[in-house]
Image (cartoon, rainbow, N blue to C red):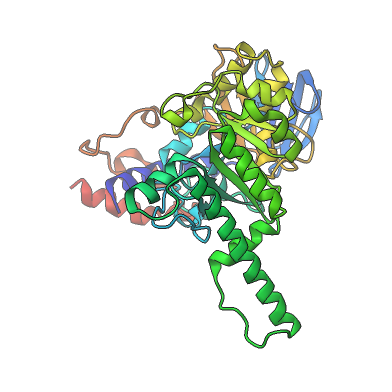
Amino acid sequence: MTIRHIIAGSFCLFFASFLSAQNGNVLIKNGTVLTITDGIKENTDVLIKNGKISKIGSALKAANTRVIDAKGMYVMPGIIDAHSHIALDVVNEATNPVLPEIWVGDALDPFDVGIYQALAGGVTISHAMHGSANAIGGQCETIKHRYGTYDPDELRMDGAPRTIKFALGENPMRVHGERNNVPPRSRMGMEQEFRRSFAAAKLYKEAKANYASGKIKTAPDYNLRMETLEDILDGEIIIHCHSYRADEIMMLMNVLEDYGVNKICFQHVNEGFKVAPELAAFGAQASVFSDWWAYKFEVYYSTAYNAAILTKNGVVTSINSDSGELIRHLYHEAAKTQRYGGLTDNEALRLITINPAIQLGIDKRVGSLEEGKEGDVAIFNAHPLSIYAIPQYTIIDGNVYFDINTDPVDMRIDIDPEETMPTFYETGIHSHNHEEDGCMEGVYEQLFLENHK
């Protein structure tokens, strides 16, 4: 175990102590509630019980429940990032252009302090994605930012639909064709990787059906790659595709149409504004940057009006971060769409709440403040589209995971691995029974003592 994980373990213990008193119940009083789907409600309360929004109304009361006075504050759904790599380390399995069988969920890192930093920006859910080295990359994981656990399973959003990473253009061409002289080396070759893969999956599916019906005597050998591709063809996995150029976006939609696949969200999609009506007609979605482009040649042509143009054409659009830093500023990124495109407040906020929820297939559970939905909430001291807005509380499943009033100062700075850290006995943390919280106090305590003799 590295010093980073030892330090993270101390954070785990801090949060275990902090969270142990929480039970998924919280009453938010007197706030301006931005529901996203049912307008703005002034001087309104939100009651969360057992992790779900129980009631939205006035003068609500609840016994044995933490109360947050949000008078003068703005209460909105937790922000959702449809494209992130936090809680992951090496995100590209770049050894083959087609690797749908791998899954980033095998490598989630609950100790990544970036999760906590995202909470400080009001972000409650992110889409932990494979990288863009492959035409068909690995499967992704939708996570809730339940920071303070050592168990990766506690990050997973149970029941969230499966998703997978595709990529177009320069990245897979460079990694495979230019470096290793294997397809794809051109944009034409990219198309054929998709077609070959889907054609093989269809044959595999037919062989299984023929064996089940008795037409053939021998079952095809089990192949996880083909199984995953078959699930894509059957609509059981949502494609999230790294993309920039309009011609390639059109190409992939043509391929998907030929194979009867329609569940796709194009990521980045910088030239989406050129083909916005076509995206809408196909039912494709778009998760974009607000104003990033020209960082390489194939992204040379773009516009800060992209999100607004896509939105006005009826494309379900979100703004994502693709960055451990920018994820804390998604509310600022949404605000830019009012400067570039004149979206309304609600249209802009949809870009970071209900729209990414739709793209991840979780909109029945999160993305808006509605009775019965999960209690994921961000509370700001000013309207979240204001440059002066600062997140005050971030709540997941009715539990407060970020409170600016109790934000540990050492969570805001880079950790010096040479710094002498206090022992558990010096901090007094040892007095809490963390075994009940699942944080393995004895293991971390011993590691600390051994490293600070």
Q: Is residue 10 left or right of residue 142?
A: left
**Extreme residue toward the left, this view:** 453
Residue 130, given in percent of the width and then of the height, sits at: 48, 48
Residue 52, given in percent of the width and then of the height, sits at: 72, 41
**Extreme residue toward the bottom, this view:** 217
x 75%, y 34%: residue: 62
Residue 213, given in percent of the width and then of the height, sits at: 75, 82
Q: Quadrant of residue 369?
A: top right
The number of numbered discs placed on residues in the rendered structure image is 0
x 26%, y 39%: residue: 421
225 up-or-down from 104: above or below: below
- Residue 138 or residue 230, whichever sits in front: 230
One can see residue 163 in this view: yes
309 up-or-down from 213: above or below: above
x 59%, y 65%: residue: 200
- Residue 195 or residue 397, whichever sits in front: 195
Q: Quadrant of residue 311?
A: top right
- Residue 219 or residue 420, whichever sits in front: 219
358 up-or-down from 95: above or below: above
